[in-house]
Amino acid sequence: MNYIRFSDFSTLADSLIIIPTYNEKENAETIIRAVFEQSELFHLLIVDDSSPDGTGAIVKNLQSEFAGRLFLEERQGKQGLGTAYIAGFKWALEKEYEYIFEMDADFSHNPKDLIRLRQACVDGAHLSIGSRYVSGGKVKNWPFKRWLMSYFASVYVRMVLWVNIRDTTAGFKCYHRSVLEKINLNNVWFVGYAFQIEMKYSAKQLGFKVVEVPITFVDRELGESKMHIGIFKEAFYGVMKMRGKKF
């Protein structure tokens, strides 16, 4: 595989972080800089759904500063989280990255945890999950009602799908490319909250090793949350439907 090698770093650039964005102008530049402060192992792909607030323009302005490391895919209209990640996964596989990450733009996921997620895959996991609900995992700044809903959503998923994953709805993940090569990305059913559940369930059903790495999840401080009741409904009914999916 032909990865980019940086002259001042002895390890191949084999890792790509995918961050979907829609109206994230308050966070875009700071999250990009925070990612690149961690390690030159990481490249970053922003998948922006034509944000009317100018998020895409902010990313474009930074591309010259981070040439060869920062990439932008612009899509027409708001198409959903799941389709943004799938577009990013296909891009990453085409470019032959070994480790492929999902990450939010709003700092609910700490860029400092990227190294630990990658290391879990280097050590033998096929999918590592930044988990709020394993020992050592935490949630900060969430209203109790939202924490309760999230926690029991994971309990519900475990009961219905019989998967031994504590944080089934987590969106901070590192995949080994073999997982995304095996999952039929053209046959992913869901685009919202249920997308995160479906991808984990698919990895488990296909026999891949999944590990959970404890993280502290922090609720966003800037910008508006993309969560709404329709996303939770999709997840609730979608989990029942997933039981019938063939792999």
Image: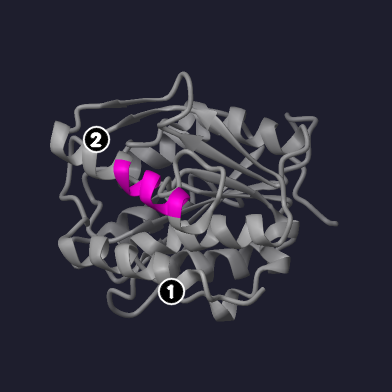
Badge 1 element: helix
Task: Determine which of the numbered discs, if any, sits on residue 219 in the image.
Answer: 2
Callouts 1 and 2 close, C-beta under 8 Å: no
- Residue 195 placement (x, y as % from top left): 43, 64
- Residue 80 placement (x, y as % from top left): 34, 70
205 vs 11, left or right, is left
196 vs 12, left or right, is left
Residue 148 vertical placement versus 70 (above, below): above
> On the rendered image, what quadrant is the C terminus found in?
bottom right
- Inspect the image, locate mark 1, and give the three-letter code of the amino acid beneath it: Lys
Q: What is the chief secondary structure element of the magenta stretch?
A: helix
- Residue 58 placement (x, y as % from top left): 31, 54
Q: Residue at x 29, y 71 (%)?
A: 50
Task: Determine which of the numbered discs, if any, sits on residue 224 in the image.
Answer: none
> On the rendered image, what quadrant is the N terminus found in?
bottom right
127 vs 107, left or right, is right
